[in-house]
Amino acid sequence: MELSTFVFLKSIWAFDFQNLVQRQMPRIEQHFHVSDTEKFKSNLLDWGQDCDTVVWLDSNQHDEKYSQHNAIIALEQEQWIRCSYQDSFEKLKKFQAKIQDYCFGFLGYDLKNDIESLSSQNHDGLEFPDLFFFQPKKLIFLSNGKATFKYLNSHSEEIKNDFESILNHKETLFKKTKNNLTLNFRIQKEDYLKKVSSILNHIHRGDIYEANFCQEFYAENEEIQPLEVYKKLNQISKTPFATYLKFEENFLLSASPERYLKKNGCQIISQPIKGTARRSSNKQKDLALKEALKNDPKERAENIMIVDLVRNDLSRIALKGSVQVEELCKVYSFKQVHQMISSIVSEIPENIHPVDIIKNSYPMGSMTGAPKVKAMKIIEKHEETKRSLYSGAVGYFTPEGNFDFNVIIRSILYNKKNKYVSCSVGSAITSLSVPEKEFEECLLKAKALREVLLS
């Protein structure tokens, strides 16, 4: 072999090896100490607003057993996928195989139509896609006083400058103006009570045991400042799965307290919420409200039904005998409400694709009912709005195939182009339900959303 040919082949092998390394390790990682975590966190979210695509996940310092990060921000699309429900899970699997990297985005409620023989014909003022995921160019994790930057190789030279920019960022100040926004009921109270009575008839006939029935509050031809609204909502809620999502003209501003599903190695965790009670500024009264929720037979029945549904969903893919209820009907307190939460864990075989795990249990039981498919059909018949991203999930996949997704509740959805604002709430209808009380529960859940939109 001539020397020139050898040098040429050597250069090809070196080039191929470099490409291989880049495919396997597409990100450069750098760590920085952060002395003031809350200030850095506030600067980080504000600084990220110049990007067209943002996913912000904030645990609000909750000492949650399965939480790994104080906050995460994913910025800008390198590659992305957005689609309607047809073959959506298969498309997502192909997208993951293509990028072999972190993948952030959301799953809309109507992906149910990709899993079961279901359809959705209700009104949709939001016009969000059913599925959207992207490979972020820039990714920053904040944990225990440390900021970890994971940038694609092509942007790694920007890490140090970005860190300095975040440290020195001046927070955006919004003018203190009162919103004159008007929130309308999609379902008027009288009609809502009739619909709950109709669902109760299905329950009494034995068609279903429980249905999560939702209604929408909406505003048309209105403009809001999404970041300002999110900050207000998060300030009065401080929930462990808070989310700010921005892509194109679409925004999610969420104070979710609920985890849908988390995968860590071969372990799966689901933490459904069923059972809500208001808070009181009076300490003794607040403790009494918490204790009353803990012992309320209706609320416990709701929660246990959904626990059984989740156990059934997970058992279809879990190792035999591994599905366990770690916590049953435990009451947790948040700034606005007390919530009854259960935790179910299971072990899965190593060869199951992470997307198939989600598809197997989607949509989450806490937002559907039991039996799930029949409940979803009855829900569709009685609701008057497509849920869109509400009662869907936002989260991320890691390169190792782990994932973590919340449940989109206590949230405001906004289509800037359409000037359409939407916030939906729901309650679980069981045989013990009283229509008036279900309506009151919906108003309680909507209280924080209405406050921030009208303040």
Image: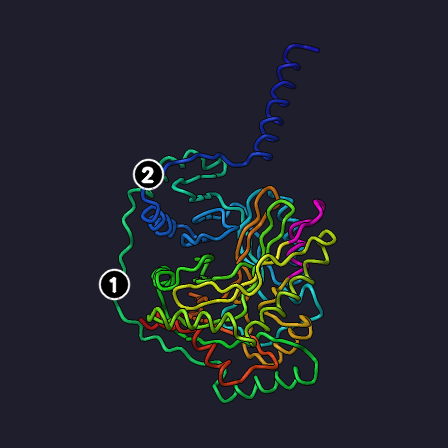
Viewer-closest of 165 and 70: 70
- Mark number displayed over residue 164: 2
2 or 1: tag closer to the N-terminus: 2
Give the residue type that dot 1 points to: Lys
- Judged from this view, the residue extending furthest toward the left is 176
Residue 144 against residue 111 in the figure, above or below: above
Q: Give the image quarter of residue 416.
A: bottom left
The spot of residue 20 in percent (x, y) is: 61, 31
- What range is drawn magenta here? 346-361
**At 56% across and 82% down in the image, what residue appears?**
433
Q: Magenta stretch containing residue 27, yes or no? A: no
The spot of residue 206 in percent (x, y) is: 70, 81
Residue beneath disc 1: 175
**At 49% across and 76% down in the image, what residue appears?**
216
- Could you classify mark 1 by the number of other residues whose Cα lies within 10 Å: few (under 14), some (14-19), or many (20 or more)? few
Is residue 447 in sight in this rendering?
Answer: yes
The spot of residue 231 in percent (x, y) is: 35, 60
Q: Quadrant of the N terminus?
A: top right
Q: How many marks?
A: 2
Q: In the picture provided, is 434 more to the left or to the right than 163?
A: right
Is residue 75 in sight in this rendering?
Answer: no
**At 59% across and 47% down in the image, what residue appears?**
264
